[in-house]
Image (cartoon, helix red, strand yellow):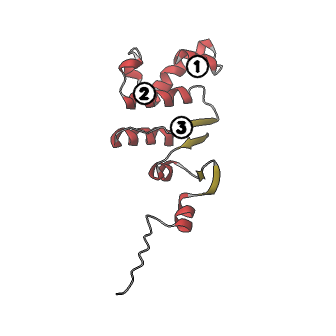
Amino acid sequence: MKLFGKLKGIADEDLDRRIDETLTFVNLMSDKKNKVANFSGGMKRRLSLAIAAIGSPKIILLDEPTTGLDPKVRGQVWRLIEKLKEGKSIILTTHSMEEADVLADRICVIVKGKLKCIGSSFYLKRMYGEGHRILINLKKR
């Protein structure tokens, strides 16, 4: 955390306080002295959020922030991202429409590198429907 704080321009006299605030935010303060190698997957994801958040950047990029997490930990990370986005712009990539629905104000769907649609979750559901559509043609004998 010190390395990333210094890279983001936090003054030496403020660094320890900002690290403590950020670790408290992601609920890792009690693990401050532990080795990251011993962290669970969820703890590592929360640490990644802490690293992204330290220095209060205006824009945060998150790539698949909850991939591989169990539902309980995924929900914790979602709540942290919701808190984190106040006063910031977060650009998040995900394959999970559920995650996009929960976290995003606007959703872009990109297929093979091309933008296919953009809008709110409500707009996309209204335009493209919810769930799956199955068309079955039967021939009469």
Disc 1 marks which amino acid? Gly
Identify residue for label 1.
5
- Image quadrant assignment for residue 93: top right
Q: Which residue type carries mark 3? A: Asp
Residue sitting farthest toward the top: 12
Tell me where residue 4 appears, x and y as whole percent: 57, 20
Rendered view: 31 above or below 73: above
Q: Residue at x 64, y 35 (%)?
A: 58
User: Could you tell which of marks 2 and 1 lies nearer the N-terminus?
Assistant: 1
**Of helix, strand and loop, which one carries label 3?**
strand
**Which marked residue is nearer to the observer: mark 2 or mark 3?**
3
Question: In what quadrant of the picture does the C terminus appear?
Answer: bottom left
Q: Residue 87 at what x, y percent from top left? A: 61, 40
Q: Which residue is mark 2?
A: 44
Discs 2, 3 touching: Cβ within 8 Å: no
Q: Secondary structure at mark 2?
A: helix
User: Image height check: is 27 above or below 64?
Assistant: above
Q: Nearer the viewer, mark 2 or mark 1?
A: 2
CA gap, disc 1 to disc 3? 20 Å
**Comes first in the chain, label 1 or label 3:** 1
Residue matched to label 3: 63
Q: Nearer the viewer, mark 1 or mark 3?
A: 3
**66 and 31: which one is in front?**
66
Above or below residue 16? Residue 42 is below
**Residue farthest bottom in this picture:** 141
Who is closer to the viewer here, 31 or 66?
Answer: 66
Residue at x 44% of width, y 73% of height: 135
Residue 68 relative to residue 9: left or right: left
Task: Bin the neighbour count of mark 3 within 10 Å (Cα to Cα): few under 14, some 14-19, many 20 and up.
Answer: few
Q: Residue at x 50, y 26 (%)?
A: 22
Name the residue located 60 percent from the left edge and 12 percent from the top edge: 13
